[in-house]
Amino acid sequence: MIAALVLAVVAGTADPCEPVEPAGSADPTVAETYRAVGDAESAAGAGDTAAVAYREALRRDPANQRARAALQALCRRATADLFQQGRHLMDAGDWRAAAAKFAEVRAAGPDASAALLEGICRHELGEDAAAARLLREAERDPAHRDSARFFLGLIALRSGEATRAASLFESVVANPGLAAPAGELARVARRTGRLVLSLLSEGGYDSNVDVTPDAVAAPSRNADGVAGITGLVLLRPFGESGPFARGNFTYRDQARFDAYDLVGGGGSVGWDAGLGAEWFHGEYGYDYRALGGAPYLSAHQLLGGAGLTTGHLSLGATYLARFESYLSATAEPYTGLRQRLEGRAAWQLDVGSRVALAYHVGKDDVRDHAFSWVEHGPRAEMGLRLGRDARLALEEAATWRDYRELDPVLGAVRSDVYLDGAAIAEADLGLPWAVRLSLGARKAFSNLPDFAYTRVTLMLGIAYTVGLF
């Protein structure tokens, strides 16, 4: 009998949670001996050997309640260990390994906590169908209902089911631990979906419409009032992952400088792929601009990007190739190919709050090589959620731009530095309306005084954004 026990241990570790198949005939005496060995091994801390002994006891006598209770205790201990291992793997951002541990816990029997956490892991991996099934299982337990609904809302939001996502988020805002993120995401859900319509009407002040150099006296003469309207339509028939189409329209009217009135529009089509830690974005776009009532710019562009997310950290890179055709005689020499490559790292502070750092390199190859340049520089972003109904976005950037050839008219090779800053504050007026205040500033330095200037814009507007379907 003991030899059989040794052979069983050598053959492999017994799972205390697996069902036990009875032997052909019951032998309570031998079963009790195995049970005693199991007790001794358990007391010595040899849980694997104890599990083998208890299973042998139950094979020979399924009615041995002491062996059954002891084996169940080992099963609970084993699943508790697996559960904690899964938690540690989640904390380390190893979602797939953590999901496997929670799946092992559930294999031992129904476990709402393991279902919830495995569902969260599957969501992070982009396996939304499996995640939804697990989260619905966890939702049946009152202790996990709110958390399960919160993550079901994230899945619905990602799949483009904006109305359902908003309903799920709003169902858990009474939970103190989820109130802030659920409220913010409910707002986002009401403004997203498979079809999004957005309209921004604003007016304000531009301190330097035609970028008059700082060296020129009384540059305030070039300040002007400005009003404009911008529209956007976004179609994502399959949600966040899949094909999309976008159209936009812009109109800007200067109070005094009619030559700078702008009318424009464009569109793009593309594909977003990846729901989990990795993502890819690709699109083709076209833009048209008229300035002062005359054709000014026609541009085709390709944009591609890829990245990954681990925990609160997101890393990504984008590449833009834009062929710009200037349609006026004075601007035609600037026609050419503009390229930009940017790497970006972002850290999510909380729902609706983040910080990000980016660095870009760029190149503009135009017909008149005296106007071609290369540039590079850093950019910093911060988005802050100021409350359930208010947000603040800040951005700062520095750019060093060097022109490639001597300008024969100026008799020099131009070199510029740009310092840019922007702040946008937005507050909800009640869905789908929001009021927006934006401030932008640029300080341009140059080795040629005619290209050193200062410009500040201040705009106040009202936005309407609604997500459908």
Image (spheres, rainbow, N blue to C red):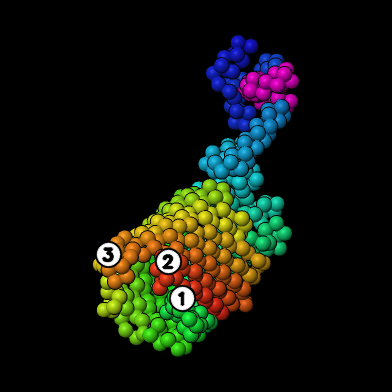
Query: Is 68 in front, or is 333?
Result: 333
Q: Amino acid at mark 3?
A: His
Q: Is residue 411 left or right of residue 422?
A: left
Dot 3 and dot 1 residues touching (CB under 8 Å): no
Q: Nearer the viewer, mark 1 or mark 2?
A: 1
Residue 122's spot in the image, x, y percent? 53, 47
Query: Is 36 in front, or is 158?
Result: 158
Residue 184's spot in the image, x, y percent? 62, 64
Dot 1 and dot 2 residues touching (CB under 8 Å): no
- Identify the residue shown where x is 71% and y is 63%: 174
Q: Is residue 233 above or below residue 70?
A: below
Q: Is residue 256 above or below residue 194?
A: below
Q: Nearer the viewer, mark 3 or mark 1?
A: 1
Judged by its main secondary structure, the magenta piece is helix
> Could you tell me how far apart the alpha carbons at marks 3 and 1 are, in whole angstroms?
27 Å
| Dot 3: element | helix
Say if residue 69 shows up in the picture.
Answer: yes
Dot 2 corresponds to which residue?
Answer: 446
Dot 3 corresponds to which residue?
Answer: 369
Which quadrant of the figure has residue 81? top right
The residue segment tinted magenta is 40-67
Say if residue 229 shows up in the picture.
Answer: no
Q: Residue furthest front?
A: 411
Query: Is 425 in front, or is 268?
Result: 425
- Identify the residue shown where x is 61% and y is 46%: 117
Q: Is residue 18 left or right of residue 192?
A: right
**Counting residues from the N terminus, which is met first, the one under dot 1 or under dot 2?**
1
Q: Nearer the viewer, mark 2 or mark 3?
A: 2
Dot 1 corresponds to which residue?
Answer: 215
| Dot 2: element | strand
Mark seen at residue 132: none
